[in-house]
Image: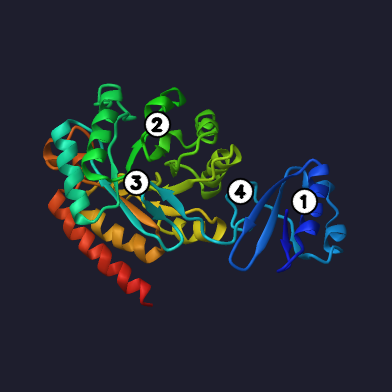
Amino acid sequence: MIIILKKQAEEKRVDALKQEMEQQGLSIHESNGENTRILGLVGDTSIVDMRHIMANDIVENVQRIQEPYKKANRKFHPDDSVIEVGNVKIGGGNFEVIGGPCSIESKDQMIEVAQKVKEAGAGLLRGGAFKPRTSPYSFQGLHGDGLKLLLEAKKATGLPVVTEIMDASHLPLFEDVDLIQVGTRNMQNFELLKELGKIDKPILLKRGMASTIEEWLMSAEYIMAGGNEKVILCERGIRTYETAMRNTLDLSAIPMIKKKSHLPVIVDPSHATGIREMVEPMSLAAIAAGADGLMIEVHNDPAKALCDGPQSLTPEAFKKLMEKVKKTRTFFQSL
């Protein structure tokens, strides 16, 4: 349930209304937008008398919310959320590109790619230290050593870094990571999400490969319910009956998320398609659909990459893509 307050509502009366709701066992989630102030009621709202609340002359309107996610719901938070990651912002008109290799392989590789993606205009650097792989015989990442190399690249370039966490027990290793990624396989690892809800650090939550939008938002709710509301969603393609591509990129999810939630949503066309030549058209299409950013895999030598070489761009190809990204964004901003 949400209570929409009238403009210039007296603060003492607002406090009294909040206290009344809390006495009924409800918690309050307050959102102050440019033109609207909302009190979101979380808990068993079936006991609340809407007519009684409407009788209060500081109240503009009262609405019941049917969706099971509350904090991630746009009705609770009408304005777009802007998430700060290091020195950059994502959401609310702020667009950023995350670039870097699927997996961290060596210091030279990481530093070279980091410098190249920064020169091309990327705002954040990605690199996988812990790699969830379908086969137990595939390269699993350098783990803690990989994180050290990623942080060296961060020091060399100044770019905020993004990397995936596999287990809550690894959290101490992620202290200097700017944006913690939850991969598709862990989207519904609820114990992990609960732990991430306890920290004060932005979380990049990828959509599960067979998850509905509601399930995706409910996973975000797990993090936000714990107190951490710094969540960025990432559409990375879903599993369908189509086999020509690695996954099917669901671009329709972007405007639907924008309708249902205030959280920023970025797109990962590399994992979505698994095909290098498809990264550019899907990136530009994602911008047209309203994405708040992109995550692009870049490798200095894709043919020798230990992970996902076929979908990785060379630094040169990434630079050309970034030029088109800028032009495409300028075009749509002018409409």
Give the residue number, with chain letter if any, for mark 1: 18
Tell me, yes or no, whether the two marked residues, 2 and 3, touch with CB atoms within 8 Å: no
Mark closer to the observer (4, 1):
1
Task: Please give the label number shown on residue 71.
Answer: 4
Give the residue number, with chain letter if any, for mark 3: 247
Secondary structure category for the residue under label 4: loop
Disc 4 residue type (three-letter): Lys
Q: CA distance from mark 1 to mark 2?
A: 36 Å
Mark closer to the observer (4, 3):
4
Q: CA distance from mark 4 to mark 1?
A: 17 Å
Disc 2 residue type (three-letter): Glu
Disc 1 residue type (three-letter): Lys
Q: Position of residue 11 (x, y in %)?
A: 75, 59
Secondary structure category for the residue under label 2: loop
Front one among 118 and 305: 118
Question: What is the image's colouring?
Answer: rainbow
Which comes sooner in the sequence, label 2 or label 3?
Answer: 2
Relative to 138, residue 5 above or below = below
Q: CA distance from mark 2 to mark 3?
A: 32 Å
Which comes sooner in the sequence, label 4 or label 3?
Answer: 4
Task: Please give the label number shown on residue 175.
Answer: 2
Q: Position of residue 223 (x, y in %)?
A: 54, 39
Relative to 258, residue 271 above or below = above
Tell me, yes or no, whether the two marked residues, 4 and 3, touch with CB atoms within 8 Å: no
Q: Position of residue 193 (x, y in %)?
A: 51, 34
Which comes sooner in the sequence, label 4 or label 1?
Answer: 1
Which comes sooner in the sequence, label 4 or label 2?
Answer: 4
Front one among 150 and 234: 150
Residue 211 visible to an observer of this rendering: yes
Mark closer to the observer (1, 3):
1
